Structure formats: C-alpha cells, structure tokens
Amino acid sequence: MASVPFEPLFKYIESKSALTLSDDEKIFVQTAFKAKHLRKRQYLLQEGDVCKYMSFIVKGSGRMYSVSEKGQEHIIRFAIENWWLGDYESYNFNTPSVYNIEVLEDSDVLMIEHDQIQELMAKIPAIDLMVKEIDRKGTVATQKRIHSSISLSAEERYDNLVKSYPEFLNRFPQSMIASYLGISPETLSRLRKNILRK
C-alpha cells in the first residue's frame, strides 16, 4: 500500500501559522502522526467510544453524525481534503462520543493523539499557532452554524451552503446534504428546483 504523503499537512501547518517548518520539525511531525488508509464507509469513530485521534484528511471525505432514538441521522459536519475530522469534546475531555464518524470515499488520513499534539504545540511554534487558528475559526464556524439552524429559513440555509461550500453539493448525496441542513430531502429537492427556475 502506498504511504500517505505528509506534504499537504506541512503546507497546511505553514499556511495557518505563517511560519516555515524546518527539516527537523517536519521529521518530528512525521513521528507524531499515524498514517491510515480507509475504505469508503469505514468508521473513524463509533458512538460510545472515546475519540483518541484527530484526523487530517489528505485525500477523501467524511462526515460526523448522531443517530436519534427514532433512527434518524443528523449530520453535524462534513470534512474534505485539508480539513480535520474528530469529536473535539471527546478528544479533549476523554469522554465517550455521542457521534459516529465515517469516511464517505476511500480516504487517506494522518491521525494524532491528544498527548502528541500537546507535545508538538510545546516544541514547534508553527503547530501552536496552527491549533490556535483552528480553534478561532472553529468557534466562529460553530457560532454561524447555530445561528443558521435557529434563525434562517430552509432556503437561506441552502443558499449559505451553496456560497460557503459549493464543493459539498458535488461530493455528498442529496439525502446527506438535507440532513446537514436539518431539512427533509423533499424540501431540498423543491429548493433546488426553485433556484433552477430563477
């Protein structure tokens, strides 16, 4: 099996931190991460387990979702190349997760445990800045998502998605897009038809 390339992660760290990694730092990063290839529909995390790893997606995509008592799936987030996937609460507090995380295509990921990311943050300034930047952006994204779900109409939510993440529409099935937006597949179908008519 071909090994998972680290170059996308190095570029990501440098772009988020605005610092250049030295060769020694790159080697240190490589020893801290575990590379893994996953087949489509394979799980990174299952409900009830503790999220031991944060996964950087080099190639592929995934989703994090919960399942209601009625068996209905609620997609919390999608992730594509150069995104991170993991349950932050479970990862940081070592608590059982209420979510499932599965890859939606054959995927290559680089995974890191909590203690190792802490060690990298202490030793590599670029990693420390990257994590702080991810936290900042993540807080804003979560705030926007909450606002969207409680304040915007289905049409406005769909419109926001089209503007913010147009690639989602080509990568993920319509039923999953509907779940992510908190609407029925029928409503999504109607919205798309209305937009095409305009």
Image (tube, rainbow, N blue to C red):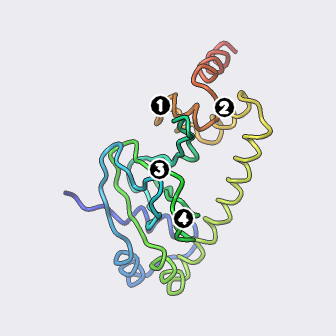
Percent of width and height locating residue 82 = 48, 56
Q: Earlier in the sequence, mark 3 or mark 4?
A: 4
Helix, strand or loop status at disc 2: helix
Q: Nearer the viewer, mark 4 or mark 1?
A: 4
Q: CA distance from mark 4 to mark 2?
A: 29 Å
Where 94 sits versus 181, above or below?
A: below
Position of 184 with respect to 81 (left or right) is right
Percent of width and height locating residue 92 = 56, 70
Q: Dot 1 corresponds to which residue?
A: 173
Which quadrant holds residue 195?
Answer: top right
Q: CA distance from mark 2 to mark 3?
A: 24 Å
Q: CA distance from mark 2 to mark 1?
A: 14 Å
Q: Dot 3 corresponds to which residue?
A: 100
Helix, strand or loop status at disc 1: loop
Q: Earlier in the sequence, mark 2 or mark 1?
A: 2
Percent of width and height locating residue 19 = 55, 76
Badge 2 local density, few (<14 within 10 Å), some, or many (20+)? many
Q: Nearer the viewer, residue 27 or 189?
A: 189
Q: Dot 4 corresponds to which residue?
A: 90
Disc 3 marks a residue whose amino acid type is Asn
Disc 4 marks a residue whose amino acid type is Ser
